[in-house]
Image (spheres, grey):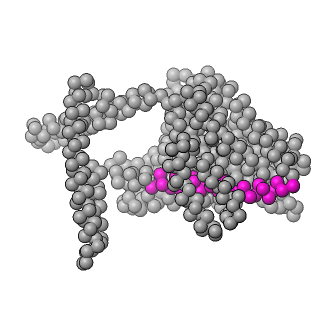
Amino acid sequence: MDQLALLFVLLLGAVVSVAVGERLGLPAPVLMTVLGIVLALLEFVPNVDVPPELILPLLLPPLLYAAVRRTSWRQFAANIRPILLLAVALVFVTTLCVAVVAHAIVPGLPLAAAVALGALVAPPDPVAATAVAGKLGLPRRLVSILEGEGLFNDVTAIVLYHVAIAAAVSGTFSPWRAGLDLVLSAVVAVAVGLALGWGTNKLMGLLGDPTLQVALTLLVPFASYVLAEELHGSGVLGVLTTALFLVEYATDADDVTARLAGHTFWDIVDTLVTGVAFGLVGLELHNAVETAAGHWGELLTWAAAVVGVVVLVRLAWLLPATWLTQRLHTARDVGEEIPVSWRETVVMWWSGMRGVASVALALAIPLETDAGGDFPARGEIIFIAFGVVLATLLVQGLTLPWLVGRLGVRGDIGREKEFERQLAVRAAKAAKRRLREIEEVEDLPEELSEQMLRRSFDIGVRISPEMAEDERREAYRQRARRLKRVRRIEGEMLSAARHEVLAARSETGADPEVVDRVLRHLDVRSLR
């Protein structure tokens, strides 16, 4: 098996793992990690030959962009307090605690290298957290916090990592210089992200075609990451800024085709890239095995100690941080999502899984220092990082569904239904207002006006039947059953039409482009 065949195996596994995971009640990223480990143990499967410095630029931009599409800037702004406590403060605290413990137990590990180890294992993986926790029916407030933490903690961790690596390689460290680098990195990234977001928004208007617009969104995350890194900024923060800008300002309510195509496209990209990313995590097992040859006992002990620090520090931080956030939370904090019970806090704690970013950063550690010597304890750092990723991803990922069920933490369905009903009412009122505006400038027959008025009400009722009164709700149900029957019959008619047109494609003298154009018209009609 060569590298290309291995890639296709991972892509196939990414697709299959989603369906298998849904049937078994297990997270797809965890299944892909297990698949990667199995492949790594097979003799005929080659070692992964991807330069470590390319792993993050190839995998993180599309994953981050896909994750940001599910949220909004206002949601981040509302949750800024809990996100800062987790994505910034907790990353610093975890890095410090891991560095102290690792420096004390690993012989010959300098403090700078220990800080690098702490930084690369500190951030929970944004993809793992949302992919695992997001499908368990958790309260939306928990998923929002986990998404925010996962998206922004890499920014803090990667900057800390680069500062520590630079200190370990050069042998010098300046706190002031490190702080200045952190600030400049953030400023440059935000500037690059906003500039690319604005430029992309303008370019989308010029392109017009949905296919070209979706293709552009695939290129933009990579461009934002690479440009920010080239200008010594944070590539992760650059991608986040660009994505948040586009989600906020590049959405045309009437561009239905582009929106449907974009959602479908990015769902596919998210599934495939996530599967490959976690498959690579498992395939990197060979690096850990090579490092541990001859002294498994010591390395397993060190890895277990760091795993314990990572897990316990998160719990020790979350308990008081959640209490403090609840105490500071007031009625004015509209939209802020916070855990409301100790059960939700425990679920948040157990959702802190590490993933592809930690492995990629570990593998990207330089081989040599500026003095020409080997980077201190590089092999040990890689083994410990891999141990942390496996322990948190497999143990926590596999047991999180059980823990959620055991604690009875579930989403507030009533609250979601009420918000859905409110949106349905707003949609129906907006349609009714527009109808009145049209009636002021156009002379509509009374029969047509009444029909359109009923349809304006139906717009909301189809979204949320609960907005209708009891009598009207029953009348709507009857109309809905009748409409469902009409649509079924029309669907069968359209299916027969599509089969006939598609059959013409293979006839002698048929123009495939004309056939496809007619078929596309029938497909769009079928969506109505």
Whether residue 283 is in magenta: the answer is: yes
Determine whether, in the image, residue 439 is placed left or right of residue 308.
Answer: left
Q: In which quarter of the image is residue 62?
A: bottom right
Q: Which of 295 and 149 is in front in this view?
A: 295
Q: Which of 389 and 85 is in front in this view?
A: 389
Whether residue 95 is in magenta: the answer is: no
Determine whether, in the image, residue 290 is placed left or right of residue 402.
Answer: right
Q: Is residue 210 visible?
A: yes
Which residue is located at x 35 percent, y 30 percent? 421
Q: What stretch is highlighted in magenta?
A: 265-294
Which residue is located at x 71 percent, y 64 percent? 43
Most common SS among magenta residues: helix
Question: Whole-percent x and y of residue 497?
Answer: 22, 60
Question: Whole-percent x and y of residue 229?
Answer: 64, 57
Residue 184 lies, with reference to residue 505, above or below; the image says above
Which residue is located at x 55 percent, y 59 percent? 11
Which residue is located at x 24 percent, y 78 percent? 509
Q: Nearer the viewer, residue 334 or 257?
A: 257
Question: Whole-percent x and y of residue 394?
Answer: 66, 44
